[in-house]
Amino acid sequence: MKVIILSSGKGTRMMPLTKDTPKPMLEINGEYLLENKINLCRKSGLNEITINVAYKKNVIINYIKTLDIDIHLVDEGDEPLGTAQGIRNIIKSFDDEQFIVINSDIWTDYNLKVLRDLKLENNLAHIVLTNTPDYLDGDFSCDGRNLLVGDSYVFSGIGKYHRELFIKHSDVELGDILRSEEKITFSIYDGKWMDIGTPERLEKVRQLEQDPT
């Protein structure tokens, strides 16, 4: 099964750390954010990896060249296309109907085997949610098995999708699609997860990883 690691964003909230370095190449205790996602894929036996690049793309491209794994790079140009549009741009060359997408700018130990083995059945997506942390506003709530727009949970940036989702909807950003589509299932993850959206959060994760107690 193919995996897309979204890596083309500018990371403007991370300035000045991202002035010369793309956000996926920021380090947490010696491991790049992008490297963390690649390792999650490999641990789950997912070796068909595609990474999209735009902002400061050469830093990522040069890093990928040093790895002993075949990774497909998709160049979006100088400006990011947006999360959903970036996925559309990638899957036009896919034969697969279903695929996994994970954001590069999160820090997690989520086991991607769960999504690898999950069947979408008649649904267009299955997304992983986590309890809304105090630094985010939240994206969803739920009523039994139904997903609702709300603030109890935040989208983790991890999901499995059917290509039809990106044909049915024309939105540029994935979040807009997820808030409007009804044929979506979800699960709640209560393990390690943090959105690395600011320098302060990056530093917090670095400290937590050094002293997890």
Image (cartoon, helix red, strand yellow):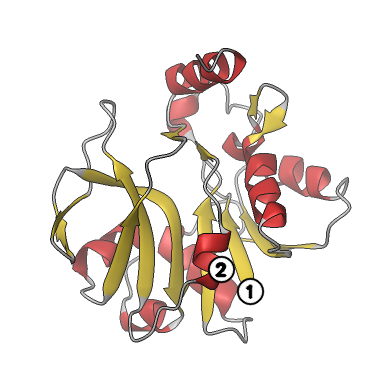
Say which amino acid is labelled 2.
Arg
Q: Which mark is residue 169?
A: none
Find disc 2 in the rendering and name its residue.
116
Q: Position of residue 152 (x, y in %)?
A: 18, 43
Residue 27 image-quadrant placement: top right
Of residues 50 and 42, which is closer to you in this image? 42
Separation of disc 2 and disc 1 at Cα?
Answer: 7 Å
Q: Could you classify mark 1 by the number of other residues whose Cα lies within 10 Å: few (under 14), some (14-19), or many (20 or more)?
A: some
Q: Residue furthest front?
A: 213
Q: Does the CB distance between marks 2 and 1 fall below 8 Å?
A: yes
Say which amino acid is labelled 1.
Met
Residue at x 22% of width, y 48% of height: 139
In this rendering, the answer to whether 147 lies above or below 203 is below
Q: Position of residue 55 (x, y in %)?
A: 60, 44
Residue at x 38% of width, y 84% of height: 121
Q: Answer whether residue 56 is visible to the viewer in this image.
A: no
Of helix, strand and loop, which one carries label 2? Answer: helix
Find disc 1 in the rendering and name its residue.
1
> In the image, is 165 to the left or to the right of 30?
left
Residue at x 49% of width, y 36% of height: 11
Q: Position of residue 17 (x, y in %)?
A: 57, 22
Of residues 38 and 79, which is closer to you in this image? 38
- Which quarter shows the N terminus? bottom right
Q: Position of residue 45 (x, y in %)?
A: 71, 62
Residue 77 image-quadrant placement: bottom right
User: Closer to the observer: label 2 or label 1?
Assistant: 2
